[in-house]
Amino acid sequence: MDYFLTEEQQMIVDIARQITDERIIPARAHLDEHHEFPRDILNEMAQADLFGVAIPEQYGGFGGGVFDVVLAIEQIGRGCIGVGTAFAANFLGAFPILLAGSAEMKEKYLPAVVSGEKFAAFGLTEANAGSDASGIQTTAVLDGDHWVLNGTKQWITNGGEAQIYSVVAMTDKNKGARGASLFVVEEGDPGFSFGPKEKKMGIRASSTTELIFKDCRIPKDRLIGRQGTGFITVMKTLDLSRPGIASLGIGLAQGALDMAATYAKQRNQFGKPIISFQAVQHMLADMAIGVEASRALVYQAAKHIDAHPKDMSKVSSMSKIFATDTAMKVTTDAVQVMAGYGYMCEYPAEKMMRDAKILQIYEGTNQIQRNVVGQELNKEYAK
Ligand SMILES: Cc1cc2nc3c(=O)[nH]c(=O)nc-3n(C[C@H](O)[C@H](O)[C@H](O)COP(=O)(O)OP(=O)(O)OC[C@H]3O[C@@H](n4cnc5c(N)ncnc54)[C@H](O)[C@@H]3O)c2cc1C
């Protein structure tokens, strides 16, 4: 379907597609098998200006919005959502600074993210605070000109690989959600270290580690926005970034469909290509419908968010649920179309299916996203 992209948007798609075809697809099996972080590929993506698609021009970016991010991430997701997750986490780490940081903070960090000189990450989750982020225990206490952080963040994407971390900590535990604040912590800050790299079912090219703060001292001006506004900025950040996760789903599902359809034309059983069997055609048809419906919803959600930044939660969550549930289904069906060959590691189908699962879990599980949509509907229908 034609989405009538502008020349600039088509350029983003073309650049991301080229890097995906030439660099990501040939490397993905190796990256997956060796749990290898794709630093060289990410550097090339930065050199091609992809890290700056949603960063304002004054900080060296392209000046686009969520829709531009979605277009870039979709292409990368078609190749490998492990690489795509590492790429997308930079926006997740940079968005709090963009949304609430001071002018000096933006000047200091955003150009470095755009150029790829520094990678970014976002630290919210803890061992006992996943879906219920209000349960975080990490604290930040002001001591003269420094904040002192103590606590451990769990499962942080780009952990150990990024240089800039947007981290949520409680500055006043008595104030509940209004007692949380956001900080920039830099690699090398005293008292800041990483846990070992987690071993994962999928997206193995991405790094996932703990962030450990033991009397970690950071300058006072690393507070992002005002004290006590951490959760508000976190919610806005996630609303902005979830369509990116949805677009990983579109790309992944498109890649799985392309592979399954190509295979179905080449594989002969009972003297015919298996694509001539109606059962197989119906599976491919449902996969294609899911991919196109996801794309239409995610693109429209991203455009809505860019146009109405104060009204983003429902469409952001809807896009994430639909596109990522579709990616799980489409990748599972791709394995089914390819059957035994799909199950073997020789083909990328099994990796796609393993990778797909995380999309329904991180940046808020799809159950939590349904809660968000339900709560918004409850408000709308009360009017
Ligand atoms: C590979 C990976 C990368 C990640 N990257 C990051 C990162 O970069 N930064 C970061 O901060 N976090 C990150 N996370 C954490 C991720 O966002 C959380 O795992 C996720 O929010 C879910 O939390 P949980 O795993 O603790 O599940 P839980 O909250 O323990 O949920 C368990 C189950 O209960 C359900 N559930 C819980 N509460 C409700 C409810 N109220 N209603 C309905 N169902 C409910 C959930 O949907 C789920 O099925 C990452 C996680 C993984 C696995």
Image (tube, helix red, strand yellow):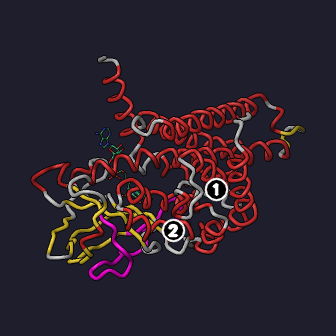
Q: What distance separates the C-alpha of mark 2 from that of mark 1?
A: 22 Å
- Mark 2 or mark 1: whose residue is earlier in sequence: 1
Q: Is 116 situated above or below 321?
A: below
Helix, strand or loop at label 2? It is helix
Q: Is residue 291 left or right of residue 163?
A: right
Q: Nearer the viewer, residue 233 or 56?
A: 56
Q: Could you tell me the amino acid type at mark 1?
A: Ile
- Whether the magenta-drawn stretch holds residue 197 is answered as yes
Dot 2 alpha-carbon crowd within 10 angstroms: few under 14, some 14 to 19, many 20 or more: many
Check disc 2 and report the residue beneath it. Answer: 111
Q: Please state which of residues 193 and 367 is positioned toward the viewer in this rendering.
A: 193
Crowd band around label 1 with a 10 angstrom C-alpha radius: few (<14), some (14–19), many (20+) = many
Residue drawn at x 24%, y 78% is 217
Q: Which residues are magenta?
A: 183-209
> What amino acid is found at the position of numbered circle 2 in the picture?
Pro
Q: Which mark is residue 76?
A: 1
Q: Quadrant of residue 157?
A: bottom left
The extreme left residue here reads 174
Q: Nearer the viewer, residue 195 or 150?
A: 150
Residue drawn at x 26%, y 80% is 191
> Is 19 rendered above or below residue 236?
below
